[in-house]
Amino acid sequence: MAEPTGGTADGAPASPPWWRNWKVMLSLWLAIAALVALGLHYNVDRSVIAGSVVVVGLVSNAFAWLLGIIALVPVIGPIIVKVLSIGFIWLINAVGYLVSYIAIRRGYSKDVLTYRGLTVAVIIGIVIGFVLGKLV
């Protein structure tokens, strides 16, 4: 006799894969937050912390899960997820980091702070404008 789809041989429903289990993902995010706090407390290089979070987040699908949780918020959640996944925003941020790196190497660190502040303000303005445009 054929096994029913979506279940086990005894008829019990199959458990979801580990990356779809909210208990596992919530524990993973709490562990990431705790390790980041420990790393900052013990003065671990920030680029090592950031790289570790990116690797763990990409390998475990933690970022996708977090975006899914944000998308559950009525009305505003799906709009925020849509804005966060727009490639243009990512491109602006990447160019900003590249220009910042070059400027810091040439000794313009004070100007870089002003520039990055303006870039963040522009990105926040684009996001707010996009959200308001979708709501109105």
Image (cartoon, helix red, strand yellow):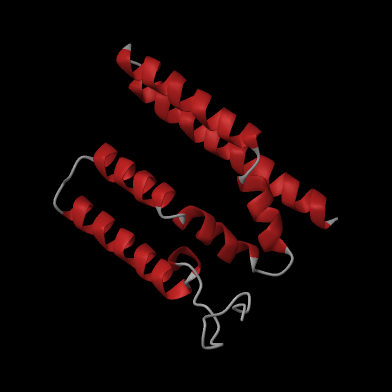
- Residue 86 is situated, as x and y percent measured from the top left of the image, at 66, 40
Residue 92 falls left or right of residue 102:
right
Q: Residue at x 27, y 55 (%)?
A: 36
Name the quadrant of the N terminus: bottom right
Q: Residue 54's image quarter?
A: top left
Q: Residue at x 49, y 77 (%)?
A: 15
- Residue 5 is situated, as x and y percent measured from the top left of the image, at 63, 75
Name the quadrant of the C terminus: bottom right
User: In terms of depth relative to the viewer, which is nearer, 128 or 72?
Assistant: 72
Residue 82 falls left or right of residue 27:
right
User: In terms of depth relative to the viewer, which is nearer, 14 or 102?
Assistant: 14
Answer above or below: position of 3 versus 103. below
Answer above or below: position of 24 versus 8. above
**Which residue ends up furthest to the right in the rendered image?**
136
- Residue 99 is situated, as x and y percent measured from the top left of the image, at 45, 19
Residue 15 falls left or right of residue 30:
right
Q: Residue at x 36, y 64 (%)?
A: 28
